[in-house]
Amino acid sequence: LTLEDLYSSIDIRILLVIAGALPLGYAISSTGLASWAASGIVSISSHAGKVGIMFGIHLVTALLSLFVANAAVIAIMAPIAVQIAAEQQMPVNGMICLVTLATSATYGTPIAHQTNLMVNPACGYSWGSYMKFGGLLQFVHMFVNVGVCLV
């Protein structure tokens, strides 16, 4: 593997998404949007304790990942998860792990991930197919991820 091969294999679009997502995450933190969103998630899910809060974060993150690029979702949700962790005395590492794992839950729509887009025309799946089978898989994925990140 030569250096030229390495450079030619890099997808510049992915680098641009990541580079654009980092300032977005900073803006979310510095404008107070992370604090506002964190308060909303906590107020809705805190009745179930810290586990409920983790389910709330996972749900919001996974829903965003169905329609927005994963790197951007991490940039959006990481400051919110850190804010919640600080306010609720929860481990930051577990919350960041949860956000990272939740962004990979892209089973519910044909546009959520590039592999879904590749499989869809070949197999003739409908949006309903993704919602029916992918929704169940996302539900299981959520329980596993929250369990893993609690440890």
Image (tube, helix red, strand yellow):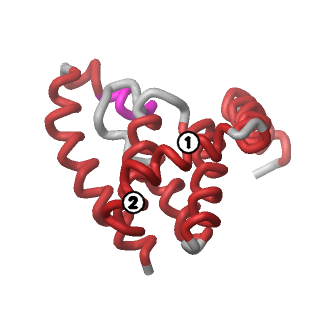
Can residue 8 be seen in the rendering of this structure? no
Q: CA separation, marks 2 and 1?
A: 14 Å
Query: At which x and y percent is residue 54?
Result: 42, 61
Instruction: Determine the secondary structure under disc 2.
Output: helix
56 is higher (above) or lower (below) than 149: above
Q: Which residue is mark 2?
A: 46
Q: Which residue is mark 1?
A: 37
- What x and y, as percent, mark residue 43? 43, 51
Where does the magenta region start and end?
113-119
Mark 2 nearby-residue class (10 Å; few <14, some 14–19, many ≥20): some
As rendered, which of 136 and 5 lies closer to the eye? 136
Q: Position of residue 127 (x, y in %)?
A: 22, 22
The quarter of the picture where residue 86 lies is bottom right
**Residue at 16 percent of width and 29 percent of height:** 129
| Residue reaching furthest to the right | 3
Q: Pick whichever, 115 or 134, lies toward us.
A: 134
Question: Residue at (19%, 20%) from the top-left corner?
Answer: 126
Q: Earlier in the sequence, mark 2 or mark 1?
A: 1
Most frequent secondary structure within the magenta stretch: helix
Q: Is residue 137 magenta?
A: no
| Closer to the camera in the image, 39 or 121 | 39
* Amino acid type assigned to the residue bearing label 1 in the image: Ala
- Position of the C terminus, as image quadrant, is bottom left
Q: Which mark is residue 84?
A: none
| Quarter-of-image position of residue 53 | bottom left
